[in-house]
Amino acid sequence: MNVGDLLDAHVEEPEGARVGVVVDVRFALAVTEPEGEGGEEDRENPDAPLSEHTATRDEVGAARLVGLLVSPRSAGSFLGYERTDVRSPWPVPQLVRRRHRGTFLVDWADVAEVRTGSEPVVVRLAAGYERRSPAL
Amino acid sequence: MTRERIVDARLHLLSRQVLDADGEPVRAVDDLELTGPDGQEARPGEAVRVGAILVGPSLFTRLFGGAVLASRLPRIAWSDVAHVGTAIELSVRSDELDADWVELWLRDHLVGRIPGGRHDPEADG
């Protein structure tokens, strides 16, 4: 299964009622902070290999699948506005938020079935699934 | 210290540039392959993680429709990823990746046979 299979998939409740479309897939990256004080520094010498610089920065480990973001209306990109509190450029956030009101995050543990054989792909949720806040 | 950072696939991962350990651009992220904890098939409701970044000749299928089998797409193991920021930076050099085999094959068999094709302009300073 790929992320591309899940994006734009139709989401159904256990009884078959349609609740929306998968607009994004959320992951939790395990990030290891670099040793020492001061945190991340800018890369100042462009001739030095990037690997020297990345060695002093946080390092990414496994990417765990957290859940699916489901929008009841539109499958279109929503630029992340409803997931953050960014307010400009006015009126783009207002319009995008209105288009995607009702968007929720559903835990991967609450997904009962993913039918990839058909087109479109259908995601069926488990009974008693919980609608969580989509905020990042 | 280890902590968790939340990212969304469309916002932070898909279509991002992949850079190798030298900062050379490799490919863009076309898709992400999901696997179970022991590398088996990802199953709904159970623990799932990203197994690999899929990079591939997606232009053809984007223009003409259809889909390439995911198992046939060139991939970069997620364990080679060192940093996720504006770009996705790897801990390995692109020469070690199978994902660039078309470019490497053309370099060795086509461009390298053109007179001057093995000349490295950056080595002249």
Image: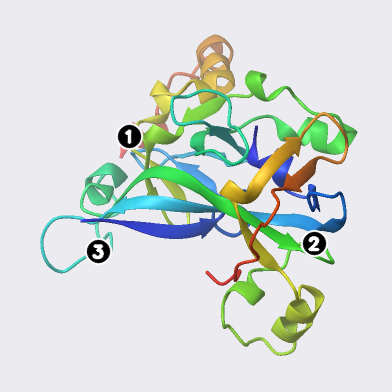
Quarter of the rendering containing residue A121: top right
Closer to the observer: label 1 or label 3?
3
Residue receiving disc 3: A40
Q: Position of residue B107 (x, y in %)?
A: 52, 18
Residue A60 drawn above or below residue A95: above
Circles 1 and 3: CB atoms closer than 8 Å? no
Quarter of the rendering containing residue B33: top right
Closer to the observer: label 2 or label 3?
2
Q: Residue at image x 81%, y 32%?
A: B61
Circles 2 and 1: CB atoms closer than 8 Å? no
Q: CA distance from mark 2 to mark 1?
A: 49 Å
Seen from the viewer's position, the closer of residues A119 and B60 is A119
Sequence-first disc among 2 and 3: 3
Q: In the rendered structure, which amino acid carries the disc numbered 3?
A: Glu
Q: What is the secondary structure assignment of the residue under circle 2?
A: loop
Chain of the residue that carries numbered disc 1 in the rendered image: B
**Dot label at residue A76:** 2
Q: Position of residue A131 (x, y in %)?
A: 65, 65
Q: Position of residue A33 (x, y in %)?
A: 23, 56
Residue receiving disc 1: B124
Q: CA distance from mark 1 to mark 3?
A: 34 Å
Q: CA distance from mark 2 to mark 3?
A: 35 Å
Closer to the observer: label 2 or label 1?
2
**Dot label at residue B104:** none
Relative side of B25 to A113, left or right? left
Share a chain, discs 2 and 3? Answer: yes
Q: Residues within 10 Å of mark 2 (few under 14, many from 20)?
A: some
